């Protein structure tokens, strides 16, 4: 909101300084993944960097996503929340710390899948995971936000947890 206000007041330099202070150095030139969609590239590459700092490898499988027309804010909600959850789960996993992210288009459907190892099997009820964090008013909202965002862009998702792996798969028409 603050950045939005600064931009609205045409205080571009202040907005840029605030953004830099919040996220650190910007790595646009170092993008490892290029999908031909600026928002997807920004989110995926930022999450790749975040994972590296945590000693986690993102195995990203994607293609040309230039035809994706989902609203930017919905894309950010969907991608960022799901990948953040996977990275966090992977930090606690006792096995190889790899998160597999798949973002492809098949038959005009965007398929977004994330697979990560888990410490123990996770109970899935009504396609949601109950947070294990003590303050459930603050935590556990990410997947609900993802669900709402997917419903706004004609998408649905499924959660599966078996064999020490947790998988989120969304299909967006």
Image: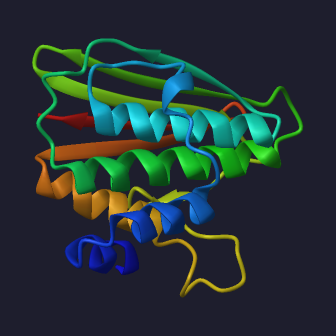
Answer above or below: position of 94 versus 23.
above
The structure residue drawn at horizontal position 30% and vertical position 33%, both measured from the top left corner, is 38
Measuring from the top left, give residue 10's x and y in whole percent.
24, 71
Q: Quadrant of residue 79?
A: top left
Closer to us: 166 or 153: 153
| Quadrant assignment for the C terminus | top left
Q: How is the image coloured?
A: rainbow
Is residue 121 shown to the viewer in this render? no
Measuring from the top left, give residue 19's x and y in whole percent.
50, 62
Answer above or below: position of 2 versus 67.
below
Q: Quadrant of residue 96?
A: top right
Q: Is residue 81 left or right of residue 12?
A: right
Closer to us: 39 or 76: 39
The structure residue drawn at horizontal position 24% and vertical position 21%, both measured from the top left corner, is 65
Q: Is residue 91 left or right of residue 102?
A: right
Q: Quadrant of residue 97?
A: top right
Closer to us: 58 or 94: 58
Answer above or below: position of 85 versus 28.
below
The structure residue drawn at horizontal position 39% and vertical position 31%, both measured from the top left corner, is 41
Q: Is residue 113 left or right of residue 9?
A: right
């Amino acid at each position: 909101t603050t950045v939005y206000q600064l931009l609205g007041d045409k205080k571009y330099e202040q907005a840029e300084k605030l953004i830099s202070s919040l996220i650190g150095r910007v790595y646009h030139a170092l993008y490892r993944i290029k999908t031909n969609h600026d928002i997807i590239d920004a989110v995926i590459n930022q999450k790749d960097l975040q994972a590296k700092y945590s000693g986690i490898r993102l195995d990203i499988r994607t293609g040309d996503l230039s035809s994706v027309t989902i609203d930017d804010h919905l894309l950010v909600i969907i991608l960022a929340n799901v990948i953040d959850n996977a990275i966090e789960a992977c930090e606690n996993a006792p096995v190889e710390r790899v998160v597999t992210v798949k973002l492809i288009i098949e038959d005009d459907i965007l398929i977004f899948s994330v697979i990560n190892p888990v410490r123990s099997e996770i109970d899935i009820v009504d396609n949601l995971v109950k947070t294990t964090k003590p303050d459930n008013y603050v935590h556990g909202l990410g997947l609900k936000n993802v669900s709402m965002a997917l419903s706004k862009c004609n998408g649905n998702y499924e959660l599966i947890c078996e064999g020490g792996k947790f998988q989120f798969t969304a299909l967006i028409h």
